[in-house]
Structure formats: C-alpha cells, structure tokens
Amino acid sequence: MTPQPTPEKLSLARVLVVGDSMLDRYWYGAVDRISPEAPVPVVRVTRTEERMGAAANVAGNIVALGARASLLSVMGDDEASHRLQALVAQTGITPHFGRDANLKTTVKLRVIGRQQQLLRLDFENTPENEVLASQSATFEKLYPQHDAVLFSDYGKGGLAHIVLMIAMARAAEKVVLVDPKGSDYARYRNASVITPNRSELEHVVGPWSDDAELRIKAHNLRSALGVQAVLLTRSEEGMTLFDAQGELHVPAVTREVFDVTGAGDTVIATLAAMTAAGMSLREAVPVANRAGGIVVGKFGTASVTYSELFAAK
C-alpha cells in the first residue's frame, strides 16, 4: 500500500517553482449560428474567467495539496501580469516576480462554446537577458530554504539559466524536478527526475515500436543526462518511471476524461509536494498518477486537494 503523508507533514514541505507563468483566459458563450462572413461559428460571449497557467498553475497545485510553494517567474508590466499577480495572491503562493516592461505576459485565451474549445489565441514574446540574470540571483537566495525545486519549462525563455540553477540545487542535495520542453534535454543534466509526455520523449529519442525498445531508449537518455529518473506520462496508459532499479509502471486510473489541460502540471506538482514531504520517487509516482486521473475530470487548468487525492479510489 502506498504511504500517505499526513497533512501536518505536507504543510512543512517547501517547493520552489521556477519557470514560465501564464494567464489562462476563458470566454464562454452560446453558439447559435454560422457567420455569414466565413464558415465559422459565431460565439455570443456570456461569461469570462481567468485562471493561473503554466508555472503559476503548478505552484497552485502544490498549495492546493497543503504544501508550501514559492514561485519565481518573469512577466511583463502589463494588465495581464497584474491580473496574474492578483490570482497568485489569492492562493497562498509566495511570489518572486521579475518584471520586464518590454515583455508581453503570456496569455492563452480559449473560446468555449457548447462545452468544447473552439479556438485558442496565444499572446507572448521573450524576456530580456537582464531580467533573466536577476532571476538567477534571486534563485540563489531562495533555493536553500526549500526541500525541492521544480522547473516548469514552457519554452517561453524564462529558464535561460536552468543549467546553473540545477547544478546549485543538486549540489545542496535538493530534489530537482523538471517538466521539459523542446529537444535540448542536455540543459536538464543531473536533475533528479524529468517528466516528459509521450510526444515530448519521442521528439528527443525517436519513436519506439514496443515497451522493450522504449525501455532501452529511456534508460539510455537517463544515463546520458545523469538524471536519477525519467517519468514518462502516457495518458490512457498511465505512467512509467525509469530509474536505477529498473521500471515502475502505474496504470491509468479509470475515469471519464473531460479535459487534459494542465494535467502534466498536476502530476509534477504532486510529485514535488510528496518528495518534499519525504516520500521516495517510487512512493510518490502512484500518488501523482492518481492526481492526474482526478484533474482530467475537471475543466481547464485545475488542481486537486489533499482530501480529493486520498479519498480517491
């Protein structure tokens, strides 16, 4: 039986989340007709909603579980950044925001009609080097105060100094978790665990024909990067941890899938909170898998509470 940290133990666990934060906007509406201008639906917007996205959503998931989260992120000095800051302030996350007046805070606007996502619009650009450099100095002050460090890489430029940050955190024997992006995994060298999904891993090691070939590719990557473990999230097939002991496969929790948005955030956030509370990676993986199974039953970027997680069967 998987061990379960007490709420008291989790409340003492401290995770530093570093990465790209975003504002998720949802416009909900009625779809009653097709536009006379083009063959597209006309959405009559009736309700709007804003939620934390990316690294901010990861930190929100950690806090929802009852652990403590600090968020180190770079954003603009625009309307979206102030909305995001207000949302973060409501959660109990400790924010450490670098601001760049030339940066457009990343916003993902989703248009929803008839319970379906019809369109997504992304607004973004890349942060300046000066802001990223100051983020490194802040990181150096923060990481010793935390039990685990989680890098949430969404490829928006906020983690230009991740190699140095990982080296510092690992030298201090912190658990270092990385949600990777892109094809250059060398920048994640020596992390404790990286958590690619199926398409992300394929992008780096190439496709595999069966589990035996996957096993070889995953362990070769683990060895090449010097990471302790690779956790492959496999959607309806669950997840598999590749580590020095071999493999640990956890089948998916059978639930109705409503929306997979942010499920990866929930998985790595749960993994970080549990390891920060003293669990091993092998003990934490089934818990993270359960959390992912719960959150796909919710709409949009969402989180899981301690009581939901440990009441779930």
Image: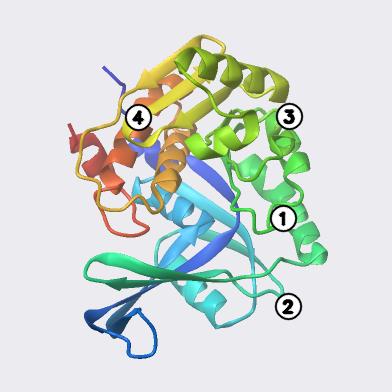
Camera-side residue: 20 or 82?
20
Instruction: Tell me whether the residue at label 3 lies in contact with that at label 1, contact meaning CB atoms closer than 8 angstroms.
Output: no
x and y percentages locating residue 299 in the rendered image: 28, 58
Q: In the visual, does 288 lie left or right of 129?
A: left
Q: Residue at x 71, y 39 (%)?
A: 184
**Closer to us: 12 or 187:** 187
In this rendering, the label closer to the viewer, 1 or 4: 4
The location of residue 80, given as percent across then percent down, is 53, 78
Looking at the image, tell me whether mark 2 or mark 4 is earlier in sequence order: 2
Can you identify the residue that label 3 sits on?
171
Residue 297 seen in the current view: yes
User: Residues under labels 4 and 3: Cα distance?
Assistant: 32 Å
Residue 132 percent coordinates (x, y): 76, 59
User: For mark 4, what is the residue?
Assistant: 238
Q: Residue 102's mark?
A: 2
Which disc, if any, is residue 138?
Answer: 1
Q: CA distance from mark 3 to mark 2?
A: 34 Å
Dot 4: few (<14), some (14–19), or many (≥20) neighbours within 10 Å?
some
Determine the secondary structure under disc 1.
helix
Residue at horizontal 62 percent and vertical 70 percent from the top? 124
Q: Earlier in the sequence, mark 2 or mark 1?
A: 2
At numbered mark 2, what does the secondary structure look like: helix, strand or loop? loop
**Mark 2 or mark 4: which is in front?**
4
Give amino acid for label 4. Answer: Gly
